[in-house]
Image (cartoon, coloured by chain):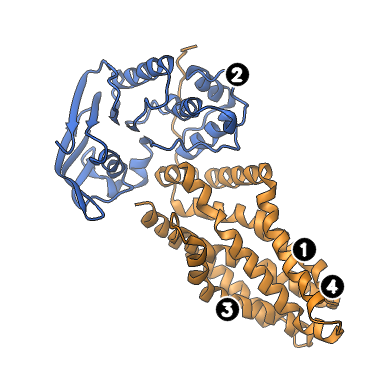
Chain colours: A blue, B orange
């Protein structure tokens, strides 16, 4: 259960949004919409706890996320604009490192399987610098495979740079997670139909 | 292709595992980018080697200036390397993920500084006695030189990490970092160079080395914590 009340965000001199609140039950997909610069990414970063809101609070299972600290972070997966992929490492190495740090230790075989699922078969051991933008995004998305036990996924424009095959695969991954009771918050400009037990649309800067 | 992958049961945060993982990752990255890693060492060797060429051929003078020259060069080389500490992690988004990982950020900062020192600091310590020979330093002074750098360069790295974290993402980060950390570097420089001078003049380097050790202990205790704090501010 993720509950936000009275969130207000100011970047520089500009007020991006105020009095934003929502309550998301397990299995809910929240789509954050709004034009460029309306504060979608800022809202997501506030939800991760990296950015401090000017006002308002966020509670995860009834407790403030700031008080939960590492306990909250161990249930949270964030996929930002940047892929957090090291160019000098291969997709397998990248995945093994990121999963180790997220506390989900996976084996080499599991990492390869996750990469295959996102369509990177044959590129597992190629240095990531040699991959295309879309392939790098896929390598980042492979993390979601091993984060199925995480209660909250926060995805910033997950469909950007992906081709149709990858979009539908990611859609499937998202739907699977929602069906098993995960909460997903995401921003997107593409209109990708996602079947979900519950959908909550949030429009910023309307 | 779309087989389900059973996620491993969530392990409790494993601090040593996370620490080793980051050290290993950064060393591997350095190994794949050897030129970057060599930069610091080359700078150090060049600066130190230019002095004997420029101050004339007076053996006594050489011996007198050697500790200062080598220590100043090591300090500048460490400072030069600081910008690389967090810059690439910041640029590709890895740092943001580190902030969101369920381990204390201090542990991960300590891991990053450790790897940074192994790549940028340890080579200076190893090269120093060879450069000391250029200056005709006696053998026991060389030993003290190595010891003082061994204690001093990690301290420089730890202090520098705070500055690097504070100036992350700023356009004039290089200059700003130098201004921020220089005042804190000076005590290390004074006692580092002082240790070698004391050894050369027969006074014994013990007190200087003990102080350097104390600096290192204090930096080990406070710097990772301060750096984490600075990183969280910079990433807002």
User: Quick one: B95 or A177, which is closer to the camera?
Assistant: B95
Pointer 1 residue: B127
Instruction: Kindly check if marks 2 and 1 are in contact, taking CB atoms under 8 A apart as contact.
Output: no
User: The C terminus of chain A appears in which quarter of the rendering?
Assistant: top left
Give the x, y percent position of residue A1. 22, 33
Same-subunit check for callouts 3 and 1: yes
Q: Quadrant of residue A192?
A: top left
Instruction: Kindly check if marks 3 and 1 are in contact, taking CB atoms under 8 A apart as contact.
Output: no
| Comparing labels 3 and 4, the label whose residue is closer to the camera | 4
Q: Which mark is residue B187?
A: 3
Same-subunit check for callouts 4 and 2: no
Structural distance between the alpha carbons of marks 3 and 4: 26 Å
Pointer 2 residue: A122
Chain of the residue on which disc 4 is drawn:
B
Pointer 4 residue: B134
Give the x, y percent position of residue B169. 44, 54
Question: Is residue A48 found left or right of A123 in the rendered image?
Answer: left
Q: Quadrant of residue B128?
A: bottom right
Give the x, y percent position of residue A195. 26, 15
Q: Is residue B182 above or below residue B30?
A: below
């Amino acid at each position: 259960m993720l509950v936000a009340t009275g969130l207000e965000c100011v970047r520089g001199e500009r007020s991006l949004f105020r009095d934003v609140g929502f309550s998301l039950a397990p299995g809910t997909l929240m789509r954050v919409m709004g034009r460029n610069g309306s504060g979608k990414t800022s809202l997501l970063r506030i939800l991760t706890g990296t950015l401090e809101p000017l006002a308002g609070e966020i509670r995860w299972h009834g407790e403030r996320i700031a008080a939960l600290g590492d306990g909250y972070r161990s249930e949270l997966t964030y996929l930002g604009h940047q892929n957090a992929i090291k160019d000098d490492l291969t997709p397998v190495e990248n995945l093994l490192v990121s999963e180790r740090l997220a506390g989900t230790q996976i084996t080499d075989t599991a990492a390869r399987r996750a990469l295959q699922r996102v369509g990177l078969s044959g590129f597992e051991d190629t240095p990531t610098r040699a991959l295309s933008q879309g392939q790098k995004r896929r390598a980042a998305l492979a993390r979601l495979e091993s984060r199925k036990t995480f209660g909250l996924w926060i995805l910033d424009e997950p469909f950007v740079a992906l081709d149709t095959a990858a979009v539908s695969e990611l859609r499937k991954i998202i739907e699977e997670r929602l069906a098993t009771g995960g909460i997903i918050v995401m921003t997107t400009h593409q209109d990708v139909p996602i079947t979900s037990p519950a959908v909550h649309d949030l429009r910023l800067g309307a | 292709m779309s087989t389900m992958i059973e996620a491993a049961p969530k392990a409790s945060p494993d601090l040593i595992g996370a620490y080793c993982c980051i050290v290993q990752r950064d060393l591997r990255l350095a190994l794949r980018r050897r030129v970057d890693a060599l930069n610091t060492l080359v700078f150090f060797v060049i600066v130190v080697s230019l002095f004997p060429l420029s101050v004339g051929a007076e053996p006594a003078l050489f011996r007198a200036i050697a500790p200062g020259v080598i220590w100043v060069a090591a300090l500048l080389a460490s400072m030069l390397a600081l910008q690389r500490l967090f810059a690439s992690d910041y640029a590709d988004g890895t740092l943001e993920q580190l902030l969101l990982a369920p381990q204390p950020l201090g542990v991960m900062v300590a891991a990053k500084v450790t790897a940074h020192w192994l790549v940028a600091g340890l080579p200076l310590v190893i090269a120093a006695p060879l450069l000391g020979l250029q200056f005709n330093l006696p053998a026991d002074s060389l030993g003290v030189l190595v010891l003082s750098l061994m204690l001093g360069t990690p301290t420089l790295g730890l202090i520098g990490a705070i500055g690097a974290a504070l100036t992350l993402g700023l356009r004039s980060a290089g200059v700003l970092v130098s201004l921020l950390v220089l005042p804190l570097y000076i005590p290390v420089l004074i006692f580092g160079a002082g240790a070698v001078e004391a050894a050369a003049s027969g006074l014994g380097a013990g007190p200087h080395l003990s102080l350097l050790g104390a600096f290192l202990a204090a930096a080990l205790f406070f710097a990772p914590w301060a750096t984490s704090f600075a990183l969280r501010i910079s990433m807002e």
